[in-house]
Image (cartoon, rainbow, N blue to C red):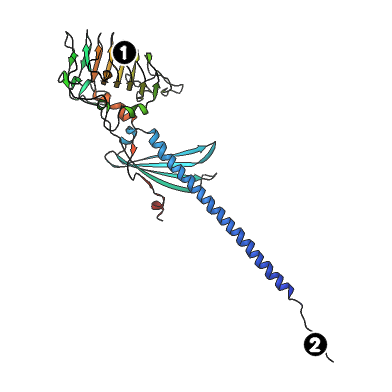
Amino acid sequence: MTRLKIHRSGFALPAALLALIIVGAIVTGGFYAANQEDKVSASTDRGSEAFYLADTGLQDLLGTERNAFFLAITDTQVVGPETVTTGGKTLGEYELLVRRTGPRLYMVSSEGRVLDGSGNTLASRTLGLQVRVVTAEMPANGAMITYGGVTVQGNGEINGADVGGPGCTVGDSVAGVVANPGATVDDGPKDKIYGSPPVDTLTMDTSSMFDFGGVDVTDLEAMADKVWTSGQNFTGMGPTTNDDGSCNTADPMNFGDPEGTGACDDYFPIVHVQGNLGMQTGVGQGVLIVDGDLSATGNFHWYGIIIVKGQLFTAGNGNHLNGVTLVRSGGDIGETSTTTGNSVVQYSRCWSQKPFSNHIRPAPLSTRAWTDLSAALTGS
């Protein structure tokens, strides 16, 4: 009887190989998916960092540059690139392009770039912001504008003839004093109030007289460079410099250099004293805000804007207030400010405008100011 032999050899090996192939494919697919997820995550993180860098560029520009920077741009201006670090780690850089698009209107584009150790760009985002130069106009109708009255004694003088200023032409004369109707204005026996006319009247209230168009006194107080929370007496104010020759703006008694051409000649601080202020001997420029009374008692020169919420008293020799001086006199028409000695309150449109152009910053448009330009620039 013949027996048939059944050959079963070789079946286990192909099955094992198939299983290994399947397992390998699953493992490889898992690694590939994980790797892709890591790449997507890294790309997302870098994109977020680039967005942060671009936004930092916009904030830095608006936080540091004033109206004067923007008004000097006739077409375009490139700023940067500037490196951004945090916690000692360099994140990347931003570069800005400022383009003038109309009178007092500007388009600011900021490209944020994440860099590797060799300086190669790993990711970039570009943001755009439309800004406008904030206009602020000091009253141009008087050397002294007062809600209450004013008395001029001795050789004191209030003069509405424009004396111009650095880089400015002399303009038309204005009134020496502009006062609320019913306020007493006494120019003394020597008739020392000059202007066109010497005295004018304007109905005003204690709020509107400190409204300057795009900003008001509250906005100026919020932007103050130097603030004292109580009454003060200042003596010997003047410009100072650091060891490297730059303007020492940290010096509390440095209020700029209106009478020189040194490092501080373009420093126009906003100074806010939350109380009464006495000043003697020294110079300053910018905006001086006094919540109480201001007393200048000799050889004090200020160029710019003075806002006094109380009363103004000047006495002694050599006081010169150049620009525009606003005095609320506490809101009581019966209260009177006094100018004596040979103190001079002098009108200068130039000096009344310089602090605004050198201090006030542009602001984003109120609606639809911000946009993400990344997709538009890449064509996607």
Residue 121 visible within the image: no
Q: Is residue 340 above or below residue 125?
A: above
- The quadrant in which the C terminus is found is bottom left
Question: How far across and down, in percent of the image, does residue 272 sit?
Answer: 36, 22
Amino acid under disc 1 = Ser
| Residue 295: mark | 1
Q: Quadrant of residue 143?
A: top left
Residue 97 visible within the image: yes
Q: Residue at position x 26%, y 39% from top? A: 103
Secondary structure at numbered mark 1: strand
Q: Is residue 123 above or below residue 14?
A: above
- Residue indicated by mark 2: 4
Q: Quadrant of residue 296?
A: top left
Residue density around tag 2, few if under 14, some if 14–19, many if 20 or more, within 10 Å: few
Please count the marks in the image: 2
Residue density around tag 1, few if under 14, some if 14–19, many if 20 or more, within 10 Å: some
Query: Seen in the image, is 140 located left or right of residue 129?
Result: left
Q: Is residue 299 above or below residue 250?
A: above
The Cα atoms of the two marked residues, 2 and 1, are separated by 129 Å
